[in-house]
Amino acid sequence: MFNKNLYLLSLVITSSLLLSACEKPPVAADKPRLVKLMSVQTSDSQQSLDLAGEIKARVESPLGFRVSGKIVRRLVETGQTVKKGQALAELDPRDYELAKTASTSQLTAAKSDLALAEAEYKRFQELQTKQFVSELDLDRKRVAVSAAAARLKSLESNVSLDNNRIADTILRADSEGVVSQVQADVGMVVSAGQPIVTVAQQGAREIVVEFPEDRRTIAAQYPQAQVSLWAQPQAKYPAQLRELSAVADPVTRTFRARYSIQAPSNALALGQSATLHLNLQGQRGLIKLPTSALVGKGQQTTVFVFNPQSQKLQSQAVQVAGVDGNEVIVAGLQQGQQVVVAGVHVVHEGQVVRPLLAKQ
């Protein structure tokens, strides 16, 4: 009896061990991911951006001869005021004068040929009425008159063209302005269209500045600006963005912008050093975030906001107002919110996380 009980006890123990071995171990719960947070401090935008620039005319025309040749006279200097039609430089006209003489001689000969052809045609008309010549001979004389007239017209055009070339040996100003640059001098042999003198036309003045790559978007977002002169920093004139280059300079990697300045005509001189002041005010609730905090979703920009109560992340849309170095100026967040500033590509909305470091 004792052996039977011992056998049953051993059987129960063996069965328990077998059942325990078949059971799966308990699955450990996933640990919340550590995230780096930043506590945002919002404020009204009081930032400004100052860029050095130069005062230029709105229209600067590099003028060149319409014909090639050797410069024999330069009649203006840099900084000189010129009037419309004033001579700026001259080329040696001898070759063009010889060409005109040749074309004029050909024109005289063509006039004689036409007169002779007309006289013969008239004579053949009289002979044809008396049946001394055929109708075919009369047609030939008629064609000869037409050919002589066409040749005369062509040579007249050549003479006019030679006259224009002689006139083009004198470079004249297209409008009133100031000579801002001289690119050639006496003795140089220049080609047609090569810039000789640059004339800055009188009229509107502009400031030309260069925007760094990381601040180009500011120019489009803030077209209103102010301009002050280095010689008169206390005087500021309103300016309006007129032109922003879409292509970066291949050397400086900057984007050129031109701002029209509203100022009295005698207040700004060409070539003056000036400063462009961009005031980034006008928006409330702006903060700075590192670029690593932004998440792009199509045309929308979002950030992950940490909820202290639920310990979860929430996606929130923001508006980018500008850039400042490696930081982005955004709007759409509230004071005290905690934003994920690192590892946004490995987290998702609704995920339970644990703060790694809170930055105030």
Image (tube, helix red, strand yellow):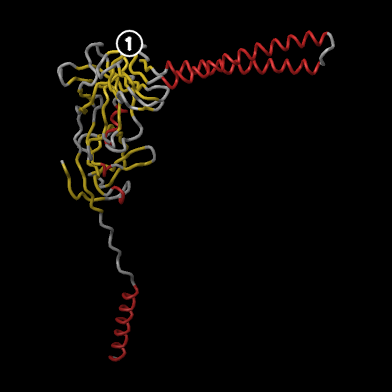
The amino acid beneath tag 1 is Lys
Name the residue: 26% across, 15% down.
Answer: 80
Answer with left or right where residue 279 lies relative to residue 220: left
Q: Position of residue 135 (x, y in %)?
A: 81, 16
Q: Depth check: 293 or 326 in front?
A: 326
Q: Position of residue 131 (x, y in %)?
A: 84, 11
Looking at the image, is 35 positioned above or below residue 266? Answer: below
Residue on which disc 1 sits: 83
Q: Quadrant of residue 127?
A: top right
Q: Depth check: 88 or 265 in front?
A: 88
Q: Quadrant of the C terminus?
A: top left
Q: Quadrant of the N terminus?
A: bottom left
Q: Depth check: 128 or 263 in front?
A: 128
Answer with left or right where residue 131 lies relative to residue 21: right
Q: Position of residue 305 (x, y in %)?
A: 26, 42
Helix, strand or loop for disc 1: loop
